[in-house]
Image: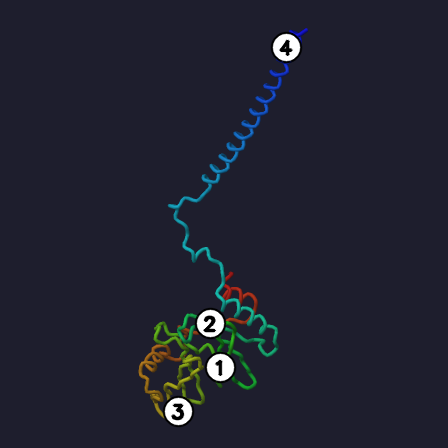
Amino acid sequence: MKRIVTILITCLLVASLGVWCSSDRDAHLQSADLHLSLGIKAETKDEIAPDKNVDLPPSSSIDTELEAWQSAYAEFLTDLSVLDDYEGAAFSLRDLDSDGVPELIIVQSYEREQIRVISVYSYNCRVYEIGKCNSPNSYAGDFRLSDNPMFPGLFSFRWGGSIFRYGYLTVEEGQLVYRDLYNMDHYHYDPPQQINISDDMELIDESRSLFPGYGFTDNLLERYPINSDNIDRMILCTQ
């Protein structure tokens, strides 16, 4: 009888030891599986990580963020486009004071009064009007642009009778400034005679180079009708 009891106790101990070993083995296998799984993920992550030596495109080519003035001008022009007073108006961009932010130039035509109104706006946390000027008997297409950075403003031409008048429109110290430069008198003189009004000969010489003769159309200020397509293309640069 004692022998039988001893055998039973021995069997129970062996079975218990086997269960413990199996449980411990499973735990180790699960731990190994976990480490293997993590190892595979880390390896995959390393494989897809960008090589530090790969040449990436310049940041400017992948940066799609707009400058603050672009968003502000686009919203401003969109609001103007629905106003009756701005039907037929056109806009352009030109950095008239060389501060890195282009001014927004809006040209309105009033055929009955034979007048054009040029309004100039800028941006500093908001869009604001710098000033405006009337241009009787003038054509906005007769604004010319110089390639010389010394002259960021608009060179203008208008006429009344047989007197051709030349001037310069710019922004100085936050103010819109227009200067009469010289006249070409076709009425009293043949050939026409130049009559200087300004003593700034550099501006006069630059104007003469931009208006070498009647009908010359190079370096014109480009104007764009105020509509969504032109706002997207010229302000937001999305087209």
Q: Residue at x 43, y 78 (%)?
A: 143
**Between tags 4 and 3, which lies in front?**
4
Label 2 or label 3, whichever lies nearer to me, is 2
Q: Secondary structure at mark 4?
A: helix
Residue 187 image label? 3
What amino acid is at disc 4? Thr
The residue pinned by badge 2 equals 93
Amino acid tagged 1: Gly
Q: What's the amino acid at mark 3?
A: Tyr
The answer to which of marks 1 and 3 sits earlier in the sequence is 1
* Viewer-side label of 1, 4: 4
Camera-nearest residue between 13 and 92: 13
User: Is tag 1's residue or tag 2's residue first in the polypeptide sequence?
Assistant: 2
CA–CA distance between discs 2 and 3? 36 Å
Circle 2: element type: strand
How crowded is the residue under tag 3: few (<14 C-alpha within 10 Å), some, or many (20+)? few
Residue under label 4? 6
**Where residue 179 sits: x, y (%)?**
40, 85
User: Mark 1: few, some, or many residues within 10 Å (few <14, many ≥20)?
Assistant: some
Name the kind of residue labelled 2 in the image.
Leu
Answer above or below: position of 165 versus 143: below
Residue 131 position, x and y percent, is 49, 81
Return the disc, 4 or 2, that comes first in the chain's sequence.
Answer: 4
Depth check: give the residue in front, 188 or 33: 33
Residue 197 at x, y percent in the picture: 36, 89
From mark 4 to mark 3, how far is it between C-alphas?
140 Å
Label of residue 25 in the image: none
Q: Position of residue 62 (x, y in %)?
A: 46, 55
Name the residue tied to disc 1. Answer: 131
Q: Say which of marks 1 and 3 sits in front.
A: 1
Residue 176 vs residue 151, the one in the foreground: 176
For numbered disc 3, what is the local secondary structure? loop
